[in-house]
Amino acid sequence: MKKTKFNIEYQLKSASINVLWNSISNPLGLAEWFADGVTVDGNDFTFSWDGNEQTASLIHTKQNNNIRFQWIEDSNTDFYFELKIAAMEVTDNLALVITDFAEPNEKDDLIMLWNKQVEVLRRKTGI
């Protein structure tokens, strides 16, 4: 099956751009909400969950804006996942926009996983 791209937007009412950026761009921040542990070797980020590891390469970053990773198994494809900070024009609040790819039969599960992880982000950072 072919993976398709999707976006999820989470509004973060009281977010500080610095806190949010640190949470999505550095290993300690990512280990607070995205994974149990994160190690970095060059541009390779290894994420661990319950003793399982998965490695993604950092393929793009723009300070206080977005960070894009590609899972090693998706090398030589157009698939990636991106965490982007967006300013909401009407409210001046921040939003976290996640772009990811999933096979049609896995999309709902992946969205539920992102929802759970972002809820942890909100609790850990108070945003």
Image: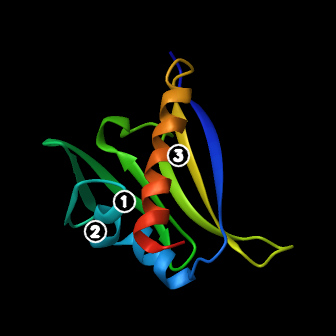
**Element assignment for label 2:** helix
Q: Is residue 22 left or right of residue 46?
A: right
- Type of amino acid under label 1: Trp
Q: Is residue 109 left or right of residue 10?
A: left
| Number of numbered discs on residues | 3
Percent coordinates x, y for residue 108 in the rendering: 56, 28
Residue at the disc numbered 3: 115
Tell me the distance, in whole angstroms, between the alpha carbons under discs 3 and 1.
11 Å
Tell me the distance, in whole angstroms, between the alpha carbons under discs 2 and 1.
10 Å
Percent coordinates x, y for residue 121 in the rendering: 45, 62
- Sequence-first disc among 2 and 3: 2
- Sequence-first disc among 2 and 1: 2
Percent coordinates x, y for residue 31 in the rendering: 28, 62
**Element assignment for label 1:** helix
User: Does 101 appear above or below 57?
Assistant: above
The residue carrying pointer 1 sits among few (fewer than 14), some (14 to 19) or many (20 or more) residues within 10 Å by Cα, namely: many
Tell me the distance, in whole angstroms, between the alpha carbons under discs 2 and 3.
20 Å
Percent coordinates x, y for residue 34 in the rendering: 36, 55
- Type of amino acid under label 2: Pro
Front-lying residue, 73 or 117? 117
Residue at the disc numbered 2: 27
**Residue lying farthest to the left in this orientation:** 51
Front-lying residue, 53 or 1? 53
- Type of amino acid under label 3: Asn
Q: Residue at x 48, y 34 (%)?
A: 110
Q: Residue at x 46, y 46 (%)?
A: 116
The residue carrying pointer 2 sits among few (fewer than 14), some (14 to 19) or many (20 or more) residues within 10 Å by Cα, namely: some
User: Does 116 appear above or below 95?
Assistant: above
Q: Is residue 90 left or right of residue 28?
A: right
**Element assignment for label 3:** helix
Which disc is residue 33 wearing?
1
